[in-house]
């Protein structure tokens, strides 16, 4: 009997050793991967667990709704298939069965469920036996005290009970699986967010460049200007064709006409299609008129549109389309059609917003050029065109007296024509943006235009209520019945200014990602995303990296005694001290969390690092922030853990942080208000 007992003890010890070795090796795989594919990491890590526990399959399920007992498979490892295997489509959303409800009610209390085929209930057998399961252990996974999901471990060869040691191994393995999946999901989320921000930045830059092109155009190079500006936008949103349509109201309804066509394959501007000149919406695409007039865009693959729309677009080879309405002075002026002849897709929301801005720029460039051409041709003033022009237009004679204006300029200021002509100077402030008095500058530019100059400048107008109206003013001349007349086009820039304000807000949002809002220094996200890259960079030159973990001593007592407002002030002060102590631009401070900070020093050895640590302690003491509840001093102090190491390519940020955190603990145990140093 003693021999049998010794043998069982030895076997149990050997089994635990196998489990421990498997778990340690698996842990190393799960925690040390950087650039490997997640499927390879999961496959290699779980293979060790499966071999140690004699398993045939491991499946990870995510809980979608605890109340509704819904869950679904998100990862599968299969021994027969050699590792990571395709997810079973039938298990992406588990059917809600009595067995599933029963299992969830047990595992939701952090209790494992162990089943063997000979003991399956009827509903368990219906679900498990047809999947070849002879024994299964269902292990719950909790993340931050929330029921995250389960990992099931299958033995399809033997019926057995999972003993305590095996269950412990598989519990640890389940947590590793979940942790790795969660980390991958967060990494992807961050990457997607950064890509989205980069995309916004790129679109913003392209819109700036396109705006500059369209706002600086002249009659001579209209086609080149449109081609250059549209090409920028088309490349950004990846389309092959753009067509601009203008509306015209007639007695039989609203008509549309092509006014500009751009085709990538044909190298830019191309000929208009005659059959698309002045055609009623009702004859071609009836429901577009109502939808576009209400401000709605069309965004779809062509073949998914109603038959009439689909056939028209596909006859021109357009596979995907975005149709953007254009409004000038709140009136439905027309639309821009963006066509993709290569890919079937829906355009993303930010792409549609960029197209809206671009369509507005296209239409305004066309309108202004068209008006200038009419005037420069020295024909009789076309009164109808003059009055219907959507851009503000004012004419004056050789005596610099106002002669006429159109409805658009009157709508801009909300006044009657005679009042505008009689009180013209009242619609400009005393001084212009360049510092010149309006009363001095206006006659000067009007006279220069009459003498043949074409002038383009920014002009500040204002409403009668005093609201500033930033405008672009274009002055030129025309000849009518042997006399020259000055023409002033006023383009309201408030929409452009609003776009610039939105762009500035976007730039502010980019800054918020990496900065702690309370202290104004870098946050933990900045450290997590940049420290590994810094280590890789420094490893190429055999450089040294030092890292400090800094903690405010007895900060909880400080908060409880002085209050959270004082606590926030204390955190900001300590952050400022730490930042100001660093002399080099390459070194930086991060708020790691709560009252903890991280200091990163590049190319700094032991001596330099020790001096900086001493200086940090001294500067905090000298600040003399009262702290009556501290067990160290009657003022605020900090404790520091400091590590320095020659960088190897195998190092990662977690090694530096963990070592500095251990040394910080030693500083606290040693009495606080000090630093503890060790080489990594």
Image (cartoon, helix red, strand yellow):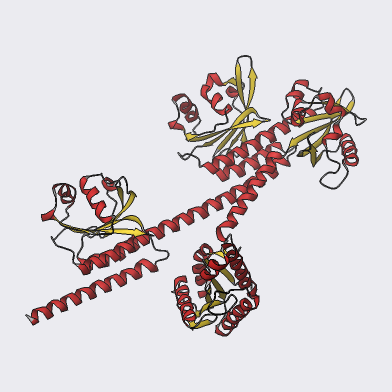
Residue 51 screen position, x and y as percent: 22, 67
Residue 368 in view of the camera: yes
Front one among 482 and 95: 95
As rendered, which of 523 and 471 lies closer to the eye? 523
Q: Which residue is drawn at the image coordinates 48% and 53% (left, top)?
A: 192
Query: Which picture quadrant has residue 293?
Result: top right
**The residue positioned farthest toward the left in the image shown:** 1
Question: Residue 418, how many percent across, how many down?
Answer: 84, 24
Is 618 or 486 nearer to us in this picture? 618
Left or right for 123, reference 31: left
Quarter the N terminus occupies: bottom left
> Which quadrant holds residue 324?
top right
**Numbered disc total:** 0
Residue sticking out furthest to the bottom: 607
- In the shown orientation, is residue 34 left or right of residue 219? left
Q: Position of residue 364 (x, y in %)?
A: 69, 34
Which residue sits at x=69%, y=33%?
366
97, above or below 677, in the image:
above
Q: Is residue 380 above or below residue 60?
A: above
Query: Is 315 or 667 nearer to us in this picture?
Result: 667
Would residue 585 be seen by someone viewing this image from the given angle?
no
């Amino acid at each position: 009997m003693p021999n049998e007992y010794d043998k069982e003890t030895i076997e149990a010890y050997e089994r635990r050793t196998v489990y421990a070795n498997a778990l340690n090796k698996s842990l190393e795989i799960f925690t040390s991967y950087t650039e490997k594919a997640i499927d390879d990491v999961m496959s290699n890590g779980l293979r060790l667990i499966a071999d140690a526990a004699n398993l045939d399959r491991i499946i990870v399920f995510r809980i979608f709704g605890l109340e509704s007992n819904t869950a679904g498979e998100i990862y599968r490892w299969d021994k027969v298939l050699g590792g990571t295997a395709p997810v079973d489509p039938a298990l992406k959303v588990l059917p809600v069965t009595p067995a599933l409800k029963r299992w969830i009610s047990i595992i939701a209390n952090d209790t494992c469920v162990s089943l063997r085929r000979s003991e399956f209930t009827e509903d368990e057998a219906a679900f498990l036996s047809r999947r070849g399961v002879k024994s299964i252990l269902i292990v719950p996974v909790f993340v931050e005290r929330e029921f995250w999901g389960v990992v099931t471990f299958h033995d399809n060869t033997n019926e057995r009970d999972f003993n305590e040691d095996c269950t412990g191994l598989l519990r640890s393995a389940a947590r590793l699986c979940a942790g790795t999946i969660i980390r991958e999901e967060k990494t992807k989320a961050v990457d997607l967010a950064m890509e989205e921000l980069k995309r916004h930045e790129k679109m913003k830059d392209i819109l700036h460049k396109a705006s500059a092109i369209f706002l600086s155009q002249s009659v001579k190079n209209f086609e080149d200007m449109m081609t250059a500006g549209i090409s920028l936008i088309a490349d950004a949103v990846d389309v092959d064709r753009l067509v601009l349509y203008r509306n015209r109201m007639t007695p039989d309804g609203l008509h549309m006409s092509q006014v500009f066509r751009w085709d990538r394959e044909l190298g830019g501007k191309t000929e208009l299609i005659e059959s698309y000149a002045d055609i009623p919406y009702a004859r071609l695409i009836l429901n577009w008129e109502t939808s576009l007039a209400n401000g709605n865009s069309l965004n779809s693959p062509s073949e998914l549109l109603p038959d009439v729309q689909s056939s028209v677009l596909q006859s021109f080879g357009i596979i995907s389309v975005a149709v953007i309405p254009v409004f000038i002075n709140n009136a439905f002026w027309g639309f821009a059609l963006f066509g993709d002849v290569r890919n079937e897709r829906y355009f993303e929301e930010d792409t549609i917003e960029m197209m809206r801005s671009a369509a507005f720029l296209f239409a305004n460039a066309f309108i202004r050029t068209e008006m200038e051409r009419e005037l420069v041709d020295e024909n009789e003033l076309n009164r109808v065109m003059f009055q219907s022009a959507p851009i503000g237009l004012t004419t004056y004679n050789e005596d610099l007296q106002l002669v006429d204006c159109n409805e658009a300029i009157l709508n801009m200021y909300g006044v009657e024509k005679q009042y505008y002509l009689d009180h013209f100077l009242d619609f400009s402030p005393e001084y212009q943006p360049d510092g010149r008095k309006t009363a001095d500058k206006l006659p000067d530019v009007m006279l220069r235009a009459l003498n043949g100059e074409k002038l383009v400048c920014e002009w500040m107008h204002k409403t009668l209520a005093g609201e500033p109206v930033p405008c672009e003013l274009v002055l030129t001349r025309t000849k009518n019945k042997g006399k020259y007349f000055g023409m002033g086009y006023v383009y309201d820039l408030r929409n452009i200014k609003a776009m610039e304000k939105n762009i500035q807000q976007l730039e502010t949002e980019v800054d918020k990602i990496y900065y702690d809002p309370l202290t104004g220094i870098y946050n933990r996200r900045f450290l997590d995303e940049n420290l590994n890259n810094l280590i890789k960079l420094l490893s190429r030159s055999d450089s040294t990296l030092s890292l400090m973990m800094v903690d405010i001593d007895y900060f909880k007592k400080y908060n409880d005694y002085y209050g959270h407002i004082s606590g926030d002030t204390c955190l900001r002060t300590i952050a400022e001290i730490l930042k100001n102590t660093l002399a080099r631009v390459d070194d930086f401070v991060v708020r790691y969390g709560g009252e903890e900070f991280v200091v990163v020093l590049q190319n700094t050895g032991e001596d330099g690092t020790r001096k900086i640590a001493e200086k940090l302690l001294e500067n905090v003491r000298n600040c003399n922030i009262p702290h009556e509840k501290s067990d160290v001093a009657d003022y605020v102090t900090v404790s520091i853990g400091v590590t320095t190491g020659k960088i190897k390519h195998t190092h990662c940020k977690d090694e530096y942080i963990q070592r500095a955190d251990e040394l910080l603990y030693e500083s606290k145990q040693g009495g606080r208000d000090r630093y503890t140093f060790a080489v990594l």
